Structure formats: C-alpha cells, structure tokens
Amino acid sequence: MSALQIQGLTKRFDKVTALADIGFEVAEGEFLCVVGPTNAGKSTLLKTIAGLIRPDRGRILAKGRDLADVAPKDRGVSLLFQNIALFPTMTGFENIAFPLTAAGETGASVEARVRQTAELLRIGHVLNRYPRTFSGGEQQRVAIGRAIIRPSDLLLLDEPLSNLDARIRIALRIEFKKLHRERRQTILYVTHDQIEAMSLSDRIVVLNEGRIQQIGRPQEIYDRPANRFVARFIGTPPMNILDAEVTSEGGAPILAGAGFRVPLRNLDPAITTLPRQVGLGLRAEEIRVAPAESRDTPFPAEIVWAEHLGPKTILDLRLGSTALKAVIADDHAVKGEGRAWLGFTPKPHHLLNRETDQFLR
Ligand SMILES: Nc1ncnc2c1ncn2[C@@H]1O[C@H](COP(=O)(O)OP(=O)(O)OP(=O)(O)O)[C@@H](O)[C@H]1O
C-alpha cells in the first residue's frame, strides 16, 4: 500500500491557483522530491498534507486512510520548515528532546534517543549548549534532529537546506541520504534546487504554477523531459532547444535550422504526428565540438564566451542566429576562443512540438 496518495488536490488563494488537480503517490520508504521554481505551489502542497491548509478539492490518503478530518497532530506527519526556530532558552539536548518530552516521555529512553539522533547528525558537541552559540549548520542539524526524533510515518521537509552556505548544504545533503538509507522513512522533500532533487530522490515531482509537469526517476527526467519547462528547469546548463523544420533531402527526412541540417535517423513513426516546425532539444554534453570541420562536426559556430570550471568548460556558442551552450573537457583541443565546429545527432524523444511545448513521447 502507498504511504501517501494525493488525488485531485486543488487550492486557490483569490486569483492564484496554488495547486491545480495534483495527483501522485509516494511508496513506503520512498524519498520523493518536489521541485519547482518560486510560487510553484510546493509549500502549499506540504502544508496541505500536514493539515495546516484545507484544500478546496481533492483527497489525501495516508496508508489508505483519508486525512480530511484528521487533525494535524494525529496525521503521523513531521514537518520541518525552511525557517527553523529553535527554542532559544533550551539547550541543544532539550530542543531535540522536545517532541518526546511534550508527549510526556521522560527518563533513560529520551536520553538514549537524543544521543542516538545527535550521533547520526554529528551534533553531540552542541547538546549542552544554547542555540545562540550554534553555527547555521548546527542550528539546522538540531532542527532536523527535532523533526526526526519521534518516528513519524511521513517526514515532510520544506527547503530544509536553503538558508545554508553551499559547503554545509552539500554535507547535509549527504547526511539526509544516509539518514534515509538507515531508516527507510518515507520522505517528501521540497526544494527549488534541481541539483539537490537529482542527488537525493528516488523519484522527482516537477511542479510549476500549481501543476505537475512530470513525475519520474531523476535520470529519466533528465534524459526524457516531458516538455520545454522540464527540459529548461532540470539540468545545468539547461537543455538547448533549437528551432528547426522537419523536411526532406533526396527523399530522406532531415532536420534543418539556422546553421545546421542533420539527417533524422532512427526515425520514430511518431515523428509524422509532429508539425513541420519543431524544437530540437540538445543537452550541452551531446554537442560534438571540434577545432576544425569534419564529417562529425560540419557546422561552424562562433565562441561567444568560455566559462572554465576546473575539469570542464562551458562554451557559449552562436550557431547561425541561435545561442547555445556546449560543455567540453578542460583539456579539449578547442580552447574557448574564435570558432568551433559542431555536430549533433538528434534523438527522436528530444523533438519538441512547438505548438504544445511537449516532447515527442
Ligand atoms: N496564504 C496565502 N494567501 C494568498 N496566497 C498564497 C498563500 N499561500 C500561498 N499563496 C500563493 O500561492 C502560490 C504558491 O505559493 P507556495 O508558497 O506554495 O509556492 P512555493 O513553490 O513554495 O514557492 P517558494 O519556493 O517561493 O517558497 C504563490 O503564488 C503564493 O503567493
């Protein structure tokens, strides 16, 4: 049975539709990330599941039980917000223990569980100190400890790492992953950071303007985005989308655009359902780049800018009138100035219907 089922969830605030007919399931023990830009509806979704917002329509079932009339505290859900507030007059220990002591638990079992949780999050050294002496990362870890100490059926995390610096964020990301591996708790994790979502999740729900754009495993979403929004939102740099026309040359189908003409191999019969004007999706790493013209790299492009990032370089290129980004290794023969020659092989599932902005399925 699913740990959580969301069915037709809809919530409006005046003119804003924060959630529009949202439906998905979370399996027992799954780590599911909800990712999307600002105002996508992510926090509204979590608050609705936690029972802090009442939806206009739709159902939320936890292990098959409808939560409509269940009070927040009885939902078996822990929620950790992005703006954590520790109790300033309590020590680290007392903060972490709070959910247990508030429920009337005392004694050795509380002590043991706080120590175990602190060990897991590597915050044993702050247990006797007060929050004003904690670093940002320590505060966040104590808040996480407080959220997880009382085993709940479902852990809801709303951008738990967003106020931290990059180094701590990456460290805590790994802690989360380990925590999940150890406990196999069902986690619903909201973030606007697609890299965080890619690295943490079993599956990702991509949300935009209150609507689900795609649900899938991280690699699947990266390789086969459903639409233009997902292609541009997931992946750094975003997927290039070149305007092109499906036409033919000597009876064979080709794709032609500004500065390129490529044969359409592996012809998917579904291509016939496309309008003539399409978009061609190209991941930066799919573009072949060479210092000279060759059969594999027949199209000349101008190098506008090269961003050197250690082991790799991101090239800003201009092909015909189109701007695009390619990624090359730092020791590549192309050094990031002047001209480069490009080549690419279109993938049928990266052809975009420009009328609907959906990729060919
Ligand atoms: N209580 C409220 N009253 C009115 N509008 C609201 C309320 N809560 C949320 N909204 C609106 O609903 C939309 C979704 O907000 P939500 O906070 O769920 O987005 P989000 O994806 O979590 O964004 P962010 O990443 O910026 O936190 C936004 O347009 C927001 O302004």
Image: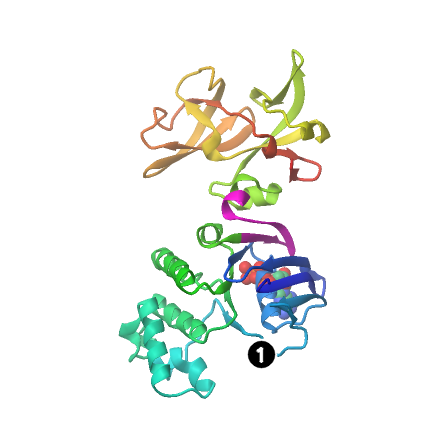
Residue 101 at x, y percent in the picture: 42, 85
Query: Is 126 in front, or is 361?
Result: 361
Query: Is 305 in front, or is 106?
Result: 106
Residue at 26% across, 73% down:
125
Tell whether 57 sits left or right of 114: right
Quadrant in which residue 91 is drawn = bottom left
Residue 7 in view? yes
Residue 280 drawn in magenta: no
Residue 329 at x, y percent in the picture: 36, 32
Residue at 40% across, 23% down:
338
Quadrant in which residue 277 is drawn = top right
Helix, strand or loop for disc 1? helix
Tell whether 191 sits left or right of 348: left
Question: In the image, is residue 341 above or below residue 59?
Answer: above
Question: In the image, is residue 299 above or below residue 131?
Answer: above
Question: In the image, is residue 68 above or below residue 162?
Answer: below
| Residue lying farthest to the front in this orientation | 1
Which stretch did the figure color magenta? 204-221
* Secondary structure mainly formed by the magenta segment: strand
What amino acid type is highlighted by mark number 1? Asp
Residue 216 drawn in magenta: yes
For ligand 1, the image quadrant comes to: bottom right
Q: Residues within 10 Å of mark 1 (few under 14, many from 20)?
A: few
* Colouring rule applied to residues: rainbow
Q: Which residue is mark 1?
A: 74
Residue 297 at x, y percent in the picture: 46, 19
